[in-house]
Amino acid sequence: TGLGNQSDDIVFPIVGEPVAFHDGPGLQTSRVYVGDEGGRLWRIDVSDLDPTEWTMEVVHDAYAGEPLDSRVRRPVTLAPAVVEDQGRDVIVVYATGDPDDLSSFQTNHKVHSLREVFEVSGAERSFEEMAVNWRIDLQIGEVATGRPLVFDEVVYFSSFSKSGASVCSRGEGRIWAVDFVGLASDVDADPTENVIPRFPTNDVQNRNGFVMFSPPLCSDDGENANPNDLERASLYCVL
């Protein structure tokens, strides 16, 4: 609304949940971060009081190097985490994937931590780029199921991976806890060392933030389901 300077074409629909950020209490919003359907992160500079001077640009592409029409690309639907580190640099953590789209469980998703970099010239300070702190490549078929949250310099997020071809396969849920700025100062460090183990029981199913301690009745086609047991589930399978 009112953008006067757009440096990148919007070739994908903006499907993500936007997050606004301001530089301090009582100050107006200075920028907004949001993802698009192609796995790219946008930065909208709304710091100017004149909306015609606002700018919008792609600041990071989770699938850099892939053609824009590549089938590998997945959307950024979850809201990113936007926080400041101890040096007051803005850190953005975002994940690709749509937990409500079953096709998201058939590809590789990524979680990135980025840092704003500014160019300083005298008293002037202008945004230059987003530097990558780290990248986590989730397992094939694993997707983040909730927006990243940062507390005490640790970013937390949950993920779910569907196992097997059957709709009755339980899959596995995981809760992650990662240093929001660096993974042992190595972008390619092993992310599994930063995972909080899930509950060690075969009867736990973690999906989209809820836990089921008794798995529901499940049948691939419903033909073999016992009608007397259908009170336990409104559907033959609860995904």
Image: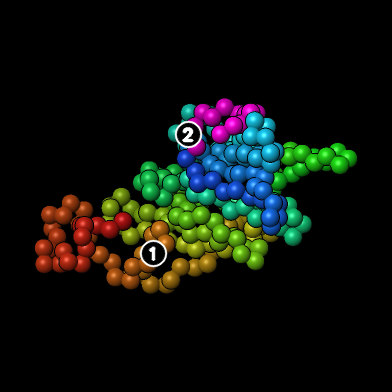
User: Which kind of residue does numbered mark 2 sit on?
Assistant: Pro
Residue at the image point whose x is 40% and y is 58% from the top: 208
Q: Which mark is residue 210?
A: 1
Dominant SS of magenta comes to loop
Q: Badges 1 and 2: C-beta atoms under 8 Å apart? A: no
Q: Is residue 221 left or right of residue 65?
A: left
Q: Position of residue 214 (x, y in %)?
A: 29, 70
Examine the rendered structure and indicate whether residue 68 appears above or below residue 211. above
User: Which three-letter amino acid code belongs to the residue tagged 1?
Assistant: Phe
Task: Give the distance between the C-alpha atoms of the residues marked 1 and 2, in whole angstroms.
Answer: 30 Å
Query: What is the quadrant of the N terminus in the image?
Result: top right
Q: Residues within 10 Å of mark 2 (few under 14, many from 20)?
A: few
Q: Is residue 90 left or right of residue 121?
A: left
Relative vertical location of residue 120 with respect to residue 10 in this rendering, above or below: below
Q: Position of residue 118 (x, y in %)?
A: 76, 42
Q: Say whether residue 110 is visible.
A: no
Instruction: Spot the residue most to the right.
Output: 122
Q: Residues within 10 Å of mark 1 (few under 14, many from 20)?
A: few
171 left or right of 20 in image: left
**What residue span does the magenta drawing correspond to?**
1-14
Q: Position of residue 117 (x, y in %)?
A: 74, 44
- Residue 177 badge: none
193 or 10, which lies in front?
10
Residue at which label 2 appears: 13
Query: Which residue is painted at 47% across and 56% down in the image?
Result: 146
191 displayed left or right of 88: left
Q: Position of residue 209 (x, y in %)?
A: 42, 62
